[in-house]
């Protein structure tokens, strides 16, 4: 049950990060889950376990980490699209 909650929280975090930035996370639900999990890892490395923890993820660092990840991912995808159209 803990894994399911972890994946749900990861998906919500990834979705919120994309919503805040106005960017779609590639891969739909799976992409949101991955962005949330990677964001939780990035945020945990930068901020530790600040704030409330749900499903094993500290919400504030996870959201900030996911925002950073989605932003960097959007920059990478934009540059690869430009390079392929040139």
Image: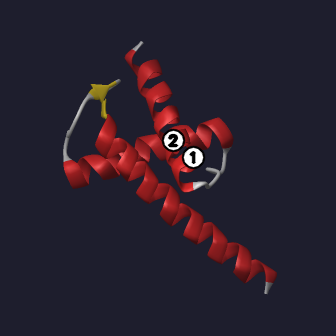
Q: Which residue is mark 2?
A: 16
Image height check: is 77 above or below 64?
below
Q: Which residue is mark 1?
A: 19
For the point 52% across and 49% down, the residue is: 20
Circle 1 packing at 10 Å, graded few (<14), some (14-19), many (20+), is few
- Estimate the x, y position of residue 14 in percent, counting from the top left: 51, 42
Circle 2 packing at 10 Å, graded few (<14), some (14-19), many (20+), is some
- Image-based side of 10 in relation to 32, left or right: left
Location of residue 28 by image quarter: top right
Foreground of the two, 52 or 86? 52
Question: Label 2's element?
Answer: helix
Image height check: is 47 above or below 72?
above
- Estimate the x, y position of residue 18 in percent, counting from the top left: 56, 49
Q: How many marks?
A: 2
Image height check: is 2 above or below 63?
above
Question: Label 1's element?
Answer: helix
Quarter of the image with the N terminus is: top left
- Image-based side of 29 in relation to 13, left or right: right
For the point 50% across and 62% down, the residue is: 71
Foreground of the two, 20 or 34? 20
- Estimate the x, y position of residue 13 in percent, counting from the top left: 46, 38
- Gap in angstroms between the C-alphas marked 1 and 2: 5 Å
- Estimate the x, y position of residue 46 in percent, counting from the top left: 23, 55
Quarter of the image with the C terminus is: bottom right
Location of residue 27 by image quarter: top right
For the point 76% across and 79% down, the residue is: 84
* Residues marked 1 and 2 touching at CB (< 8 Å): yes
Q: Residue furthest bottom?
A: 86
For the point 57% across and 70% down, the residue is: 76
């Amino acid at each position: 049950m803990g894994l399911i909650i972890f994946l749900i929280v990861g998906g919500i975090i990834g979705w919120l990060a994309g919503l805040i930035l106005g960017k779609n996370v590639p891969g739909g639900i799976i992409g949101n889950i991955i962005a949330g999990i990677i964001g939780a890892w990035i945020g945990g490395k930068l901020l530790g376990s600040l704030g409330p923890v749900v499903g094993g993820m500290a919400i504030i660092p996870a959201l900030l980490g996911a925002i950073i990840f989605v932003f960097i991912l959007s920059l990478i995808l934009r540059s690869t699209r430009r390079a392929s159209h040139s």
